[in-house]
Amino acid sequence: MQKLTGFLPDADPTTPGVITSCTNFLPFENGMKGSPTAVTPSEVPALSAECLGASIVTKLDDTRRIFAGTTDKLYELVAGAWTDRSGAAYTGGSDTRWTFAQMGDATLAANLSDYIQRSTTGAFATVATAPKAKIVFSVGSFAMALNTNDGTYGAQTDRWWCSATYDDTSWTPSLSTLATTGRLVSTPGQITAGGRLGEYAIAYKDRAIYIGQFVGAPAVWDWLQVPGEAGCVGVEAFCDVGGAHFIIGPDNIWFFDGSRPSPIGTGEVRQWFYNNSSSAYRYKTRCSFDRQNNTVWVFYCSSSATEPDSALVYHLQTKQWGCVTTPCQAVVNYISAGTTIDDLVDVSATIDGLASYSFDSQFWLTGGKSLSVFNDSNQLQSLTGISASSTFTTGDVGDDDSVSLLTKLRLRFAPNYTPTTATVQTFTKMNEGDGLTAASSGTLIDGKFDVIQAGRFHRVALSFTGDVRVLGVGAEIRPDGLY
């Protein structure tokens, strides 16, 4: 029985355990599983327009606020309704994204078209001394704004600002408050993304990374460029995975811990990703860390799409990849209200209806976080449902000199995760460089597929319905002659 090594389309197809193709199939600690379906929380209605950014923030007393932005509105989810919290008539366009930051009890929101907004309770209000900014985040005792437009310097895509220390309402440069501004000009291009990494501020360009360190007056922040040409393609094309950033660059995928960026996916999925994602809309890539499942989801626009419709999934522990098809206007780790016995009738009128939720899902837990996306209907949905359908295709098993006979294929499923249905289509070829020829097909009987085909190399494509977790694949192959 061969343990699966994950989705590796760039690897040698004869690598043991390799998956050459998959849909809605992703890694977990012990193998690969069908991806969860999207489920609509009963307490969350659809937004009135496309979601252009969302965030769940936590205040100092551990209470949470859930925000979502559209082209002209900022909304907060309150008691099962999206409540308008706009503090002005916003002027963003369809391609304008909202970014959010939390400073103590204050939430900041920025979209570059409008001046930074602030709310502690109720509606947002314009921060009078703040710039317009594409990116806003907090680090230490400061709020930081990147890629800005203001009345003094105008639109400068390489400019950064920091607020006064411990005061996100004060942005007027002053040595006494430590509010200041500067530019990152040692490399070309605009600042594309930024965020906190420990006590440091990180600013990304397309092919550059800058580390900002607080040094006090008069410079306040000292920015050092990281050697190399690693960078980030868009505002949401990175995420913090706990002490490091996972980054999508223009031609590589990076892991950055504050010292040197390390490429990941080379020889595994890198080339496949850049061949199969839209170069024109790669800046719309959205990364999110699903801490509960220890996976990073990279939502991207496929080759013919203009909005994210697919996702690469990377498991931080096993370092394996998967691939999922799902639309994504925006992504958050939604925190559910939990479910009690008395509430079950609101979930489903019948016991059978509860089966649409995986029983190890965070949906059932009070305060449980679950990766959630806004779909094409502006509806927030948690990725907590039972897997509906999934597929994967193995690599090639065989030998360049010997013809072999494949007579049986067996799968090892995790306990209680045998799929509802499973089918197989086998393929064969005589030389590794040849195209594949379809051969036997069949259905799962007693945990195995009975097939028969001859060739130097064998490959199988498997399709499932229902919740499935595969731990390994075993093939019964015997010699069938020499060529």
Image (tube, rainbow, N blue to C red):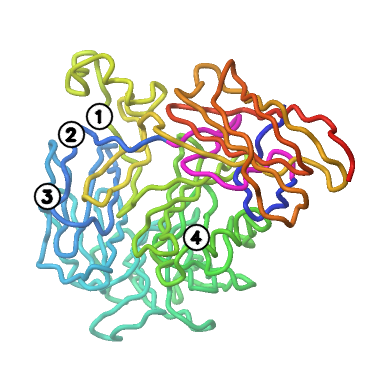
What residue is pinned by disc 2?
43
User: Of tags 2 and 4, which is closer to the observer?
Assistant: 2
Find residue 257 and name its label: none
Task: Give the amino acid at mark 4.
Answer: Tyr
Mark 4 or 3, closer to the camera: 3
> Circle 4 is placed at which residue position?
200
Q: Residue furthest bottom?
A: 153
Cα gap from disc 1 to disc 3, whole angstroms:
21 Å
Residue 227 in percent (x, y) is at 64, 72
* The stretch drawn in magenta includes residue 470: no
Q: Earlier in the sequence, mark 4 or mark 3?
A: 3
Q: Amino acid at mark 2?
A: Glu
The percent coordinates of residue 313 (x first, y second) are 50, 46
Q: Is residue 29 rendered to the left or right of residue 371?
A: right
Dot 2 and dot 1 residues touching (CB under 8 Å): yes
The residue to which callout 1 is attached is 337
Count neighbours of disc 4 (C-alpha within 10 A) and say few if under 14, some if 14 to 19, many if 20 or more: some
Give the residue displayed 51% in from the left and 65% down from the top.
213
